[in-house]
Amino acid sequence: MKINSLASMALVMALAACGGNSLLPDETETVTPTPTDPDGEEVVTGATPVTVVTEIKNNMTSARVIKGTGGNPDTLLIAITAIDTTPVQATWQRAPALDIPGFQAYSVQEDPLDRMFIGLSAASADGSASATMAGDGGQFNKVLQGVDYSRVGGYSPPPATGNGPGTGQVSYSGKYAGLLNGGSDDTARLPLPAGRDYDREEIPGQPARITGDVFMNANFADNLINGVVKNRVAVDLDISNDPASPRFNDGTGVPLESVVMVIDGAGEGTGGQILANGTFSGKTERPNQDRTGQYGGVIGGTNGSSVAGGIYLEANKVFDSDGESIENAVERGVFVLNQCGLTATGGDCVGTAP
């Protein structure tokens, strides 16, 4: 079924009875405050653990891919406050049919009337940084999403002295994977059993997957990083029957507007600043500079070889290729990047130094 309009929440909820693929609000967990010094400032050193930005993390506690042995597929060991399955730290199975470029997919749905979750996970070329996104498509008026990004082993920045390529200013490229709060074609969801009536709130939705490319520049003398999520496509978004609409899915997905990860200007704040432990965060904007949400991440590896991070786009701040907001849409996603000239070549690394 295609949803032709998502103009209001009332309409979204009414149409959910037809297929469960509406776009719904997200649910946020309570997060313990970060330790601070006597002046109220966050204490950050090179040994400070990686903390995922609260609005991006949302319902996620932890996520880790367990490599399969003896011919068995990988699994995802995940802890997310999301009514997914039991125990709290649960195992989700590989779902190759839901893979998108650069990311392996995992899923869980215990029965046709339980929430249907998709997880998308990737690691950097040297294994020093990884990120996982998980979420459902909505049920009982709420969507449950979460993001985890982390670093394995130590971290050392590129040398920030001297002149020329590779001496403090570097570029990163890689893939992006995101999930919308519903709106998909529901093809991976378990079929609803016959023989009973369904209230619209009972029907679980499948999240719509988003793919894209990410390019970032970082300067380790100024300790700043910024970039863009581009070539964004909602692979299985299904909200228009009109072939003339920019939201019509002809089988190749629905193109979406780019998301810019910006640094703050003088006196504006610390957005884009690389902290002592290699973490960073800041605001996301549309190409026209309107604010849309937040980004965050962590740099890992020797000479800052890799980056993993995530974004959160607020309700009604997801835009199609015509620059029109997709009503009620909320997006979270992750990216995993490799340093150009070190662990990445070609593609968006062409023309970068070193």
Image (cartoon, rainbow, N blue to C red):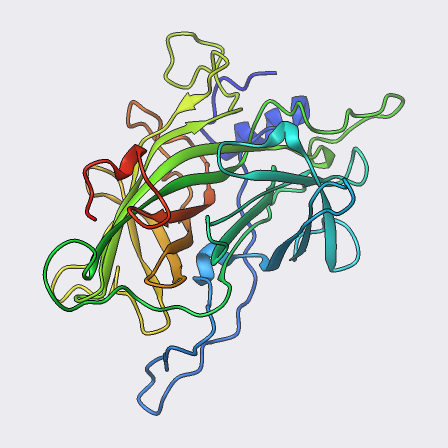
Q: Is residue 132 above or below residue 18?
A: below
- Position of 85 with respect to 331 (left or right) is right
Q: Is residue 97 above or below residue 123?
A: above
Residue 279, horizontal then vertical, whole percent: 37, 65
> Can you tell which quarter of the image residue 95 is in?
top right
Q: How many marks?
A: 0
Q: Looking at this view, is 331 or 168 the one in front?
A: 168
> Can you tell which quarter of the image residue 266 is in?
bottom left
Q: Looking at this view, is 212 or 146 the one in front?
A: 212
Residue 39 visible in the picture: yes
- Position of 28 with respect to 336 (left or right) is right
Residue 17, horizontal then vertical, whole percent: 67, 26
Identify the residue at the far bottom of this view.
38
Residue 119, horizontal then vertical, whole percent: 61, 43
Residue 138 visible in the picture: no
Q: Is residue 186 above or below residue 204?
A: above
Identify the residue at the far top of this view.
243
> Residue drawn 55% across and 66% down?
30
> Residue drawn 38% across and 57% down?
296
Q: From the image, which quarter does the N terminus lie in? A: top right
